[in-house]
C-alpha cells in the first residue's frame, strides 16, 4: 500500500459505526484490552472523550484504523496513553506506522514527555511495530486481561521524549 493512499484525519462522530465494526471483529477483538462488545454510541463516547484526541486512518474514504491519545492529569500530566486498532485486512500495510507517527507528533505538540500503551505479550506484530517506533517494554503485567476464559499477560510499553 502506498503512503499516499492512506489519509489521516481527526475522528468524526460518523466514524463510530465503521470503527466499532473493526473493533468487534474476531481478529481485532482477540488482542484488545478493553471490552469488545460496545455499542456504536459507547464506541463514539470512548473514542471522542474530551480528554482524548482520536485520529482515523482512511483508505478510499473508509475508516480502517484509529489511534487515540489520552493525556493524564495531576502529577502525571506530562504523560499520555495510546490505544490503537486496525482492521485485519489493513494490518502490515504501513497504517499502524502512519497512525503511530501522527499520534506521537500530537503528543509532542502537547509537550508530553512520555506515552505508554498496553499490549498482549502474544501480539507479536504490534510489539514489533512499537519497538520499531522506539517504544520499550517496561514491565509485564501478569494475568492482566481476559481472552475468553483465559487470563493473558500484557506488556506495558512506553516511549520517552
Image: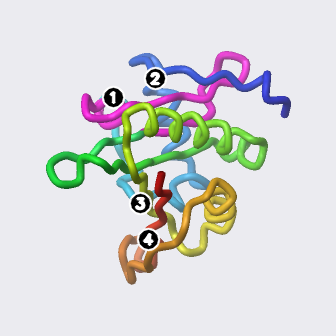
Residue at mark 3 to residue at mark 1: CA–CA distance: 18 Å
Mark 4 sits on what residue? 148
Cα–Cα gap, marks 3 and 4: 12 Å
132 or 50, nearer to the observer: 132
Q: Quadrant of residue 50?
A: top left
The residue carrying pointer 2 sits among few (fewer than 14), some (14 to 19) or many (20 or more) residues within 10 Å by Cα, namely many
Point out the frontmost of discs 3 and 4.
3
Q: Nearer the N terminus, badge 3 or badge 4?
A: 3
The quadrant where residue 131 appears: bottom right
Q: Position of residue 102 (x, y in %)?
A: 57, 34
Q: Which residue is mark 3?
A: 33
Query: Which element carries disc 2, helix, strand or loop?
Result: loop
Secondary structure under the numbered disc 3 in the rendered image:
loop
Question: What residue span does the magenta drawing correspond to?
Answer: 42-68
Looking at marks 1 and 4 on the same chain, the residue that comes earlier in the sequence is marked by 1
Q: Which residue is mark 1?
A: 48
Residue furthest to the right in view is: 2
Residue 75, x across and y down, in percent: 17, 54
The answer to whether residue 81 is left or right of residue 30 is left
Question: Could you tell me which residue is drawn at 79 percent across and 29 percent down?
Answer: 3
Amino acid at each position: 500500500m502506498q503512503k499516499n493512499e492512506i489519509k489521516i484525519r481527526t475522528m468524526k462522530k460518523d466514524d463510530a459505526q465503521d470503527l466499532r465494526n473493526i473493533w468487534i471483529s474476531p481478529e481485532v477483538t482477540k488482542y484488545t484490552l478493553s471490552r469488545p462488545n460496545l455499542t456504536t454510541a459507547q464506541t463514539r463516547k470512548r473514542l471522542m472523550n474530551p480528554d482524548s484526541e482520536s485520529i482515523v486512518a482512511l483508505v478510499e474514504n473508509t475508516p480502517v484504523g484509529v489511534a487515540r491519545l489520552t493525556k493524564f492529569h495531576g502529577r502525571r500530566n506530562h504523560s499520555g496513553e495510546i490505544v490503537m486498532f486496525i482492521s485485519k485486512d489493513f494490518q502490515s500495510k504501513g497504517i499502524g506506522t502512519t497512525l503511530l507517527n501522527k499520534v506521537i507528533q500530537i503528543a509532542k505538540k502537547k509537550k508530553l514527555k512520555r506515552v505508554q500503551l498496553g499490549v498482549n505479550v502474544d501480539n507479536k506484530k504490534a510489539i514489533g511495530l512499537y519497538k520499531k517506533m522506539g517504544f520499550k517494554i517496561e514491565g509485564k503485567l501478569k494475568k492482566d486481561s481476559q481472552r475468553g476464559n483465559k487470563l493473558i499477560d500484557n506488556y506495558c510499553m512506553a516511549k520517552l521524549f
